[in-house]
Image (tube, helix red, strand yellow):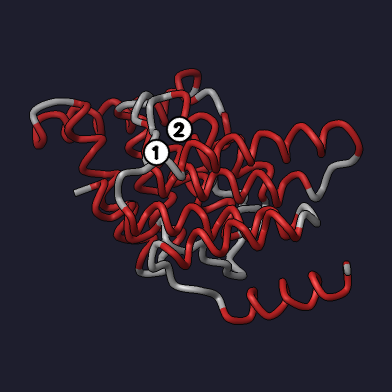
């Protein structure tokens, strides 16, 4: 179920005006990093929640999966505060669930906080998330993060993005492969590498991928200007 929800979500990154700059720790990833174990009130509530959820789902791992699913459902409905609360509850139950960090990253992307999103996607990747759609979004977000950096760091992030796109394009699923190449085309465009951007776009189209007409028009304009 989680994978099905993610495949739908991974085909677009939503941008909204909602804010993660909240004073409510339940609306911040991992409760804002506060040490909840040293707060008797939080510790009591967390233990009660973990016990009740574990009894309902038979294990903490299964309970975490349930809350992650709810988090993605809330995300897909545009209920971003509710999604954050569900991902945080899942984190309490099982911080090793990779999809929690995917959720955090998507919510940071909503805020256009691309480098913070990259940090969360990196955690998801380290914890075993390797699906093509995710890798494409991780790569494109890394490219956007690179644009906020300069010199060598920017070059390294562009290289990381291209490596991730290389991985995502290896999917045996043609639809996901087409999506990966389209994402890569947009990434190369942002890197001002218009020749490779065109190559990736043609790859995507050859696989039956849907084309962003506005993007294709912009690419043609840049190619004309560079001649």
- Residue at 88% from the left image edge and 69% from the top image edge: 227
The location of residue 166, given as percent across then percent down, is: 53, 39
Q: CA distance from mark 1 to mark 2?
A: 8 Å
Residue 171, by quadrant, is top left
In the foreground, 211 or 65: 211
Q: Are marks 1 and 2 in contact (CB under 8 Å)?
A: yes
Give the secondary structure at mark 2.
helix
Side of 65 relative to 10 (left or right): left
Side of 71 relative to 164 (left or right): left
The dot on residue 124 is 2
Crowd band around label 2 with a 10 angstrom C-alpha radius: few (<14), some (14–19), many (20+)? many
The dot on residue 100 is 1
- Residue at 58% from the left image edge and 44% from the top image edge: 139
Residue 163, by quadrant, is top right
Side of 184 relative to 12 (left or right): right
The location of residue 214, given as percent across then percent down, is: 63, 81
Residue 216 to residue 75: above or below: below
- Residue at 72% from the left image edge and 60% from the top image edge: 189
Residue 156 to residue 35: above or below: below
């Amino acid at each position: 179920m989680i994978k099905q929800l993610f495949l739908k979500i991974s085909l677009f990154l939503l941008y909204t005006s909602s804010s993660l700059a909240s004073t409510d720790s339940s609306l911040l990833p991992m409760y804002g990093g506060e040490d909840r174990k040293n707060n008797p009130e939080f510790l009591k509530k967390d233990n009660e929640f973990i016990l009740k959820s574990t009894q309902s789902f038979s294990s903490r791992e299964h309970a975490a999966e349930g809350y992650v699913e709810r988090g993605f459902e809330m995300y897909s409905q545009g209920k971003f505060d509710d999604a954050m609360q569900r991902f945080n509850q899942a984190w309490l139950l099982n911080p090793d669930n990779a999809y929690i960090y995917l959720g955090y990253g998507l919510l940071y992307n909503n805020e256009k906080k691309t480098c913070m999103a990259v940090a969360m996607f990196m955690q998801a990747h380290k914890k075993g998330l390797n699906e093509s759609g995710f890798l494409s979004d991780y790569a494109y977000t890394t490219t956007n993060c690179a644009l906020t950096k300069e010199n060598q760091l920017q070059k390294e992030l562009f290289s990381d993005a291209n490596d991730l796109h290389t991985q995502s394009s290896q999917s045996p699923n043609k639809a996901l492969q087409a999506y990966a190449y389209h994402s890569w085309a947009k990434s190369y465009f942002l890197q001002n590498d218009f020749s490779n951007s065109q190559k990736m776009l043609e790859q995507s189209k050859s696989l039956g991928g849907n084309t962003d007409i506005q993007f294709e028009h912009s690419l043609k304009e840049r190619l004309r200007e560079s001649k």
